[in-house]
Image (tube, rainbow, N blue to C red):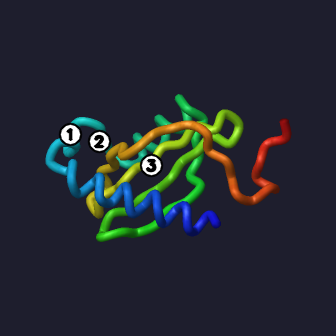
Amino acid sequence: MLAIVLNLLIQDATRSTVAAQAEVIHANCAPRDFVIQWLQDNKGQEPVASRLADGILLEILANRATGTWTIIGTTPHGMSCLIRQGDGWIPTDPSERSSE
């Protein structure tokens, strides 16, 4: 199930990235190390999934406790751009879910 959801998110993100690439190039982009560290420090998000699509590394980072998530795309040159953010992340593996 996670693979299906990830594929749908990646397809949507890839279309969005291509369509908005000219607008996004400098708006929400920074070196990947900076973006990952910022998301960890400020949102408590950790990488949960990744896939290579059309030469772009697409990654989903999520905070399992709060449910927030972010999709980033990273170029071969190491520049990462924010693609989408949201909340309501629910891991499909029950062992990954926080106890409530």
Disc on res. 29: 2
Near mark 2 (Cα within 10 A), the count class, few <14, some 14-19 or many ≥20, is some
The answer to which image quadrant residue 89 occupies is top right
Residue depicted at 29% across the width and 37% down the height: 28
Q: Nearer the viewer, mark 3 or mark 2?
A: 3
Image quadrant for the C terminus? Answer: top right
87 sits to left or right of 9:
right
What kind of residue is marked 1? His
Residue depicted at 40% across the width and 69% down the height: 52
26 sits to left or right of 66:
left
Residue depicted at 30% across the width and 70% down the height: 54
The answer to which image quadrant residue 34 occupies is top left
Disc on res. 26: 1
What kind of residue is marked 2? Cys
Say which label, 3 or 2, has the lower sequence index: 2
Real-space Cα separation, disc 1 to disc 2, in angstroms: 6 Å
Instruction: Name the residue furthest right.
Output: 99
Query: Is there CB contact under 8 Å for labels 1 and 2?
Result: yes
- Dot 3: what SS? strand
Disc on res. 71: 3
- Measured as percent of width and height from the top left, residue 30 is found at 31, 42
Near mark 1 (Cα within 10 A), the count class, few <14, some 14-19 or many ≥20, is few
- Measured as percent of width and height from the top left, residue 73 is found at 36, 54
Say which label, 1 or 3, has the lower sequence index: 1
Residue depicted at 76% across the width and 53% down the height: 96
- Dot 1: what SS? loop
88 sits to left or right of 52:
right
